[in-house]
Each structure stands twice: as C-alpha cells, then as structure tokens.
C-alpha cells in the first residue's frame, strides 16, 4: 500500500491534515485582514488621514468580506469542491496584497483593501463547515478552538512584524512580503488536504432544496451578540495603537502591547473549547462579556499608557477567547446540511454589521477624543452580556 492510498483510508490522519490545512489557511487569511490595522498609523501619516478616514479603510475590507460570506456559504453548501474554493480565496488575497503595495492614493488603497476582503470572504464559511461536519461535539469544540487560535495568532504576528519592520522598510514592503507568503500558503493547503477530503466525507446530502435551522429562535440573539462583539474586536484592534501613542507610548511599544494582548487572547481561544465542554456556551459567553465590560471601563480611567498594559492584555483574553465558543454554538444551531450557509449568514449579519464601527468610532473619536473608544466598547459589551444571559441556552455540553 502506498502512502497516498494509506492516507486516504486513514480517517484520523486525514482529520489531522484538515485541521493543519485549515489552521495555516486561517493564519494567512486573518493576518491579511489585520495587516491594515497593524500599519494604520503609518498609512494615516503618509496619506494625511483623520481618524474617520483611517477607520473607513478597515471598514471597507471587513464590510465587503462579510457581505460576501453568505454567498460563499451558499456555494459551499452546494458543492464538493471546497478545497479549490478555499485555495482560490488565498490566491485572490495574495494578488490584492501586491496591488495594495502599489497604491498611489487613498482611493486606490481602499479599492485594493476591498479586494483583499473579497478573497478573505471565502475562508470562514468554507473551513468552519469542514470542521463542524467531521467532528463529534467534544472533538468539534476542541478543533474549532485550535483552528480559531491559529487565526488569532496571526493578529499578534501582524502587529509584531509591522511594529519593527514597517518603520524600517515601509508598510508597502510588508504587503509585498506577505503577498508572497500567502501564495505559498495556498499551494501548501492544496497539497496537505487536496482531493482526499472527499474520501472521508460524503457531501451528497448538501443538495437538499430547503434551508433548515434546528431552532430559529437560537439564531437571532446569536447574530446580535456576534454583531456587538465583532464591533468591539474591530474597534479595539484598529484604535488601540492610536490610543497608546496618544498617551505618549512610542509606536513600536504600542504595537508590542497589542501583540501581548492578542497572544493572551490566542491562549484564551485555545483553552475555550475545553472550558465550554465543562460549563457550556452560555456561561462562557456571559463570563467573557462581563470581563470585557469591566476592563473597558477601567481603561477609560487610567491615563498612564504603561499602567494600561496588563488591563489591555486582560481585554485581549476575553475579546479573542470568546469566539470558539460562539462558533460552537453556531454549529449546534445549524442544520448539518447547511453549516456553511449558516456560518456565512451569521458572518455577514454579525461581522458585517460590526465592520461599520471602525468608521463610526473614528468619527466619534474625532469629536470626543480617543478615550471614547473604550466607552463604546464597554457599552457594546454590556449589551452583549444582557442578551447572552437572557437569550442563550446552555447546550448539552456533557454529551458526545
């Protein structure tokens, strides 16, 4: 028996390959999206942008990415060509990254960033559909935690690399290097997973004619929570460096602080699957939302940038660590034949709506100052806490 034939008959090995391929694709996808936030102060300085105009760049990429995810989810729910679809998204991101490095003005920059959003719209509905359908409940939660953590780890990496290399070589060079890295990742993902996915997972049932959700009442509050927390995620990741530099911290140190924040969050994401298995999705969601509310309020009362570092790291734990739990809840609520479409819908409505907030928060900051950013986060987090406490249900978290 050849290695290839053995691989195609060994499901456990193939599951690990899917997790690995999904993880590196998630890293490449999310770093591409977050790179503009990591370099935003330098971009704003070059093009002489105010906070609102800077926030609009982030909004453009995130909004287009999430608007398209329902469409991508629909396609993914009706085809067995998931891996070529995933790879095509990465190749689009790579080409768009090269174009961003050539941006001559603000309009070109927004257009090419939006093109990155088009490519990035593919990953989440496709990859989370793969993971949600091949794992038992316990395994699925852990797999979602690991793969989500791989994407979350891209965020500190983006800020770390940009914080040291962008001031030396320019933000355009960062996009050239990363465009090359994403192209290599696309080929690796295709090689690691390739066509052997179809050997362990029968997608013939995905050609049903009716879109069904187990319990539609579970979906609406979940969309609202995703919307509120996605808004917080984009606002914090876009303006924390601005906020710390406004308090007197150097750009490199401010970026490094965000790196620590996201690393702590990545650890939270990796552990949240196990935590969810113990206490359930509702309890984890409420706990993390309360932490985010309280730490955001504390942040507004401290004017020393260096004293804020531990508080910001705690914010990162709840801001990032909560997502695997929410994704697990989505997988539970969705009909198994339309998991990709369900993810796509929630990403479009939740993350897409939240994508407006970097621009909205930027406009508010132009008038009220950057401290208002964390007041917005506290208000949105409190609203998410109330909805989660009143509307979410704890799943059968002890079943397999």
Image (tube, grey):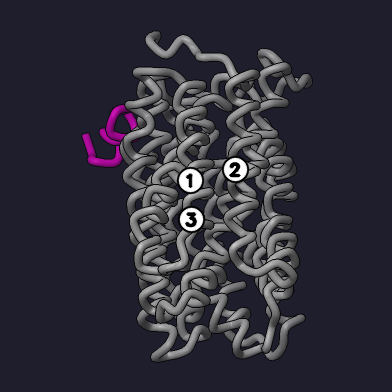
Classify residue 205 by image quadrant: top right
Where residue 49 sits: x, y (%)? 69, 82
Residue nearer the viewer, 268 or 16? 268
Report the magenta residues as a range: 1-14
Q: From the viewer's perspective, is residue 251 above or below residue 18?
A: below
Q: Is residue 161 visible?
A: yes
Q: Is residue 53 left or right of residue 261?
A: right
Q: In this view, does 367 lie to the left or right of 291?
A: right
Residue 336 lies in magenta, yes or no? no
- Mark 3 vs mark 2, foreground winner is 3
Q: Is residue 156 above or below residue 126?
A: below
Front position in the image: 75 or 100: 100
Q: Distance between the residues labelled 3 and 1?
A: 14 Å
Residue at 59% from the left image edge and 36% from the top image edge: 80
Residue for badge 3: 299
Q: How far apart are marks 3 and 2 (CA)?
A: 17 Å
Q: Which of marks 3 and 1 is in front?
A: 3
Q: Is residue 178 left or right of residue 236?
A: left
Q: Position of residue 311 (x, y in %)?
A: 39, 53
Query: Measuring 47% from the left and 85% from the top, which residue is drawn there?
Result: 173
Report crowding for label 3: few under 14, some 14 to 19, many 20 or more residues within 10 A (C-alpha).
many
**Tag 1 secondary structure:** helix
Residues under numbered marks 2 and 1 in contact, where contact means CB atoms less than 8 Å apart: yes
Between the C-alphas of marks 2 and 1, the distance is: 8 Å
**Mark 1 lies on residue:** 319
Per the image, is 10 magenta?
yes
Residue at the image position 58 percent from the left and 27 percent from the top: 330
Identify the disc placed on residue 229.
2
Name the quarter where the N terminus is drawn: top left
Q: Of marks 3 and 1, which one's residue comes earlier in the chain?
A: 3
């Amino acid at each position: 028996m050849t290695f290839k034939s053995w691989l195609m008959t060994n499901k456990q090995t193939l599951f690990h390959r899917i997790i690995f391929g999904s993880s590196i694709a998630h890293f490449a996808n999310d770093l591409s999206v977050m790179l503009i936030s990591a370099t935003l102060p330098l971009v704003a300085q070059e093009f002489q942008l105010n906070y609102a105009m800077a926030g609009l760049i982030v909004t453009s990429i995130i909004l287009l990415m999430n608007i398209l995810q329902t469409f991508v989810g629909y396609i993914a729910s009706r085809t067995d060509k998931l891996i070529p679809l995933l790879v095509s998204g990465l190749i689009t991101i790579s080409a768009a990254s090269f174009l961003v490095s050539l941006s001559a003005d603000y309009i070109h920059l927004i257009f090419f960033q939006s093109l990155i959003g088009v490519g990035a719209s593919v990953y989440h509905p496709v990859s989370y559909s793969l993971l949600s359908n091949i794992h038992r409940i316990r395994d699925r939660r852990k797999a979602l935690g690991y793969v989500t953590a791989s994407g979350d780890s891209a965020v500190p990496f983006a800020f770390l690399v940009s914080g040291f290399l962008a001031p030396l070589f320019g933000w355009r060079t960062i996009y050239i290097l990363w465009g090359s890295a994403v192209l290599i990742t696309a080929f690796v993902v295709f090689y690691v997973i390739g066509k052997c996915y179809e050997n362990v997972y029968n997608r013939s049932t995905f050609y049903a004619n009716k879109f069904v959700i187990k319990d539609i009442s579970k979906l609406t509050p979940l969309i609202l929570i995703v919307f509120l927390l996605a808004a917080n995620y984009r606002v914090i990741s876009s303006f924390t460096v601005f906020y710390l530099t406004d308090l007197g911290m150097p750009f490199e140190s401010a970026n490094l602080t965000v790196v620590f924040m996201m690393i702590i969050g990545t650890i939270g994401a990796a552990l949240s699957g196990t935590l969810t298995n113990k206490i359930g999705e509702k309890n984890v969601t409420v706990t993390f939302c309360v932490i985010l509310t309280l730490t955001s309020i504390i942040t507004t009362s401290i004017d020393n940038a260096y004293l804020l570092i531990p508080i910001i790291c705690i914010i990162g734990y709840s801001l990032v660590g909560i997502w695997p739990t929410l994704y697990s809840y989505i997988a539970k609520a969705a009909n198994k034949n339309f998991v990709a479409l369900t993810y796509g819908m929630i990403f479009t409505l939740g993350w897409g709506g939240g994508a407006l907030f970097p621009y909205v928060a930027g406009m508010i900051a132009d008038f009220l100052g950057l401290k208002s950013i964390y007041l917005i986060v506290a208000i949105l987090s409190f609203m998410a806490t109330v909805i989660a406490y009143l509307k979410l249900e704890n799943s059968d978290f002890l079943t397999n």
